[in-house]
Amino acid sequence: MKKLTTNVIGIDQGDMVMFSDFQDGGEMWTGTGPRERRRRVTFDEPFREVPSVHCALSMWDMDNGSNLRGDLETENIGRDGFDAVFKTWGDTRIARARIRWIAIGPVRGEGDWDV
């Protein structure tokens, strides 16, 4: 469990399209086997420490002719942002996917001094 010991907590959140491959025949829609898409998320302002980040699919548009396979992860979480990583495999065909995320952690307060 992460315990926050500051009195100023920041919450940053957002929503973004991970990919939209059906429009241009991208590999998530036309490919097979292991595939991955990675997008960098930058926070509005840096946290004082590495925040806790939650990421979830808010929309996915998939072909119903194969098994639905997907894995969404966060990687390289830092004070200024993180990487959202979506993976699929086999014969799964994904036209597009959108994610929502939230980051919670300590931020600088108005009375904080640089020493």
Image (tube, rainbow, N blue to C red):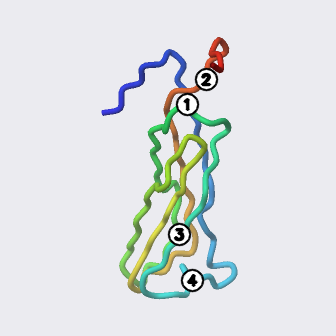
Mark identifier at residue 61: 3
Kindly identify the amino acid type of the residue bearing the numbered disc 2.
Arg
| Spatial separation of the CA atoms under disc 4 and disc 3 | 14 Å
Residue in the image at 62% along x and 55% along y: 16
Residue 84 versus residue 81 in the image, above or below: below
| Spatial separation of the CA atoms under disc 2 and disc 4 | 42 Å
Among numbered discs 1 and 3, the one appearing first in the sequence: 1
Q: Disc 4 vs disc 3: Cβ atoms closer than 8 Å? A: no
| Spatial separation of the CA atoms under disc 2 and disc 1 | 6 Å
| Spatial separation of the CA atoms under disc 1 and disc 4 | 38 Å
Q: Name the residue under label 4.
A: 27
Kindly identify the amino acid type of the residue bearing the numbered disc 1.
Arg
Residue 112 versus residue 15 in the image, above or below: above
Mark identifier at residue 108: 2
Q: Disc 2 vs disc 1: Cβ atoms closer than 8 Å? A: yes
Kindly identify the amino acid type of the residue bearing the numbered disc 4.
Glu
Kindly identify the amino acid type of the residue bearing the numbered disc 3.
Asp
What x and y, as percent, mark residue 32?
Answer: 46, 88
